[in-house]
Image (cartoon, rainbow, N blue to C red):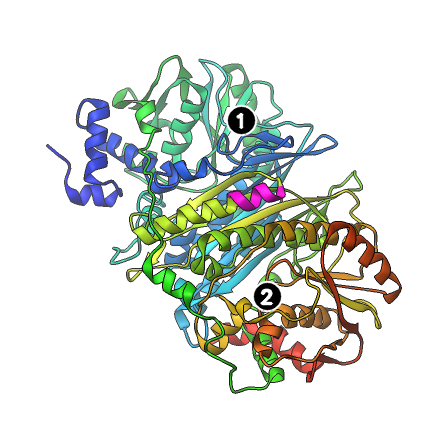
Amino acid sequence: MPVSQETLDEIALSRAEYEAIVDRLGREPGNLELGLFGALWSEHCGYKHTKPLLRRLPGESNRLLVAPGAENAGVIDIGDGFAIAMKIESHNHPSAVEPLQGAATGVGGIVRDIFAMGARPIALLDSLRFGMPQDNARVQFLVHGVVGGISWYGNCIGVPNVGGETWFDKSYTGNPLVNAMCVGLIENANIVSATAKKPGDLLVLVGADTGRDGIHGASGLASRTFEEQAEMRSAVQVGNPFLEKVLIEACLEAINVPGVNGMQDCGAAGLTSAAIEMAERSGMALRLDVSRVPRREEGMTPYEVMLSESQERMLLAVEEHAVPEIEALFEKWDLDATVIGHFHAGAEVEIYDGETPVSETPIEPLTSAPEYAFTAPKPEWLAKLQATDPAAPGLPPVSPADALLKMLASPNIASKRPVFRQYDHHVQTNTVVEPGGDAAVLRLKGTSRAIAVTTDCNGRLCHLDPRTGAQIAVAEACRNLACVGAEPLALTDGLNFGDPETASVQYQLVESIEGITEAANAFGIPVVSGNASLYNESAGKAIYPTPIIGALGLLEDATKHAKIAFRQQGDAIVLLGRSAPWDGPGTLAGSEFNSVFHDVATGLPSMDLNLEVRVQQLCRNLVRAGLVSSAHDCSDGGLAVSVAESAITGGLGASVTSALPDRWDAALFGEGQSRIVVSLPESELAHLKAMATELDVPVSVIGSVGGDRLTFGEASVPLTKAADAWEHGFERATTG
């Protein structure tokens, strides 16, 4: 009998997809088979709407050791026998339902993706989006729950959380975004693959027992919108960070045992995805016995065992002779290691419950989800937004000085110290530049070098122009690296969008991925890994398109780095990327200023990638030469905010001497791209200008460091008042 629509809705398969399954199998699927297809053809696992687009992303580099999408994470060679595994991934819908556990298990999942590659996790970053927190108890609850979950899990497993971003806009009110990034260190090029090596390899499940938590997490929570959803708490996984800590150590020890041939994380779709994709990568068949899976709940069916997303579980492909040693190793760490199946020649997955066959399905149709290509025109509503003058609202009825204080207190601008102070960012003792700057810097022990990591995206700019906004996300992430002196090596992307079955979201997806591609090519770096999270909608409204970019950079000398804080009285303040301090009214497009004072997002953002690349090269050269006292990206909030943040963090005042133009709003708070604020001794100005001329980068000496006030032309505020607004704005906005 044909399956009911209710069943298809539960596993997020369309009627057409069901008919395709019947056609591929030549028969109706059984109940368990249908669950397998629902999971593996889900948006979260099958990438039905993004695979054709993702193939356009640049994925080549002479440093690339693992091709994008081939394994659990991308791997970049950084020399001296070291490599970095990196990936970003979302846990948006679970975090909206249960913020603490949703965020915590998001951290746990991305960490497992990294150590599945044989890499020791050395750093976490988080990129978060919420609705406006002021007077919104639900948003405040989500903020505190998500931050609490990230800190709880990360602190317990002993991986430092060193960076990220927290951003607010009403488009995220019903659907927050929780993206976690992890980087890990691989020594001696010892990369582990998620494959078996030969027929006869045994499938060993290690870690936690299996329960009913997370069933339909991939096909339910992650593959449909929140509109009129049923209660979904049972689809949210439950984490145990203390177990994951010992699982990390046990797995990293196990990969050195002769006969351990592969390792795979049990993440989305649990055993279904992990085991079947492992068999597919290996080019072999798999026989799996669900009766052997250790369980923590009575009466679980094969369907529940296969679809459970219980956390802290890994699969190993192990030669038979090595099983006793593996069992003893995991017992030493108080962990289970259980043989649950074996690989053999063929092309099917056979699932048994003891001696009883439950299903037998060809692997190829399971792992070959349909792909949907689309070309959607620019929506009319977007053309109207872009054609609207961002300066049209005019000046607000406040002084420039009062506007600066209000801007510094905005939760998007204010210090995120209330967030990152909850994270242990010094565990493992590698952190050189802490959270709160443009990028984190971590030393590589045993070498003179360091890596830099960051995340960035402005969803408001992507809303106004998905292509340019995505270019800006890449440029800002790389600019953050340049500000600490690091050369960008690789990117990872967390693509957060609404319902891909709508024309507007299709247009956003196509344009955003084109923008990422163009920007990555301009910098000559690959996108090595990532995640697509679609159906991020609530009450029929999509989030802003939010392609979050994680970036990795390298410093050859860890001691030659810069921070954002002004350090010396009398230093000159120089703006890289402009020949004059003030930008014009067009730079108010999508600005934080227009959001704060006029509650609008209009206009057309612009980006000059050629200039951007040159500005960043100049900044890196200045940092490496030891010429600058500080360097800070000029982005959200514009020039005034950038200068203010450097002054506040350094405890030194600053003065920008040029008179303000009539449109002081754009001059102070416009968000033109390709700008970096540096400070340096006046005696080094000639050197800076010569280096700028060589790279054809315009620069402007705009003021000096010193005093106890922030002064921009005729506008002036005490540094203490500015510091109070910036340091406490986030807390005041997010506390009811």
Q: Nearer the viewer, residue 161 or 206?
A: 161
Image position, residue 59 (x, y; %): 54, 34
- Pick the residue in front: 612 or 174: 612
Image-quadrant location for residue 730: bottom right
- In the rendered structure, the answer to whether residue 140 lies left or right of residue 125 reads left
Return the residue at label 1: 193
Give the numbered dot on residue 142: none
Q: CA distance from mark 1 to mark 2?
A: 38 Å
Answer with the quarter of the image where residue 710 lies: bottom right
Location of mark 2 (residue): 416
Q: Is residue 89 visible?
A: no
Q: In this view, which residue lies farthest toward the left?
A: 1
Residue type at mark 1 is: Ser
Magenta segment boundaries in residue numbering: 517-523
Q: Quadrant of residue 563?
A: bottom right
Looking at the picture, tell me which residue is in the foreground, 539 or 510. Answer: 510
Q: Residues within 10 Å of mark 1 (few under 14, many from 20)?
A: many
Q: Is residue 470 left or right of residue 436?
A: left
Q: Nearer the viewer, residue 572 or 646?
A: 572
Q: Position of residue 713 (x, y in %)?
A: 70, 81
Main secondary structure type of the part rendered in magenta:
helix
Q: Residue 415 appears at what percent x and percent y?
A: 61, 68
Q: Give the image location of residue 361, x and y in percent.
A: 28, 23
**Please, what secondary structure does the residue beneath circle 2 have?**
loop
**Is residue 522 a member of the stretch shown in magenta?**
yes
Q: Amino acid at mark 2?
A: Lys
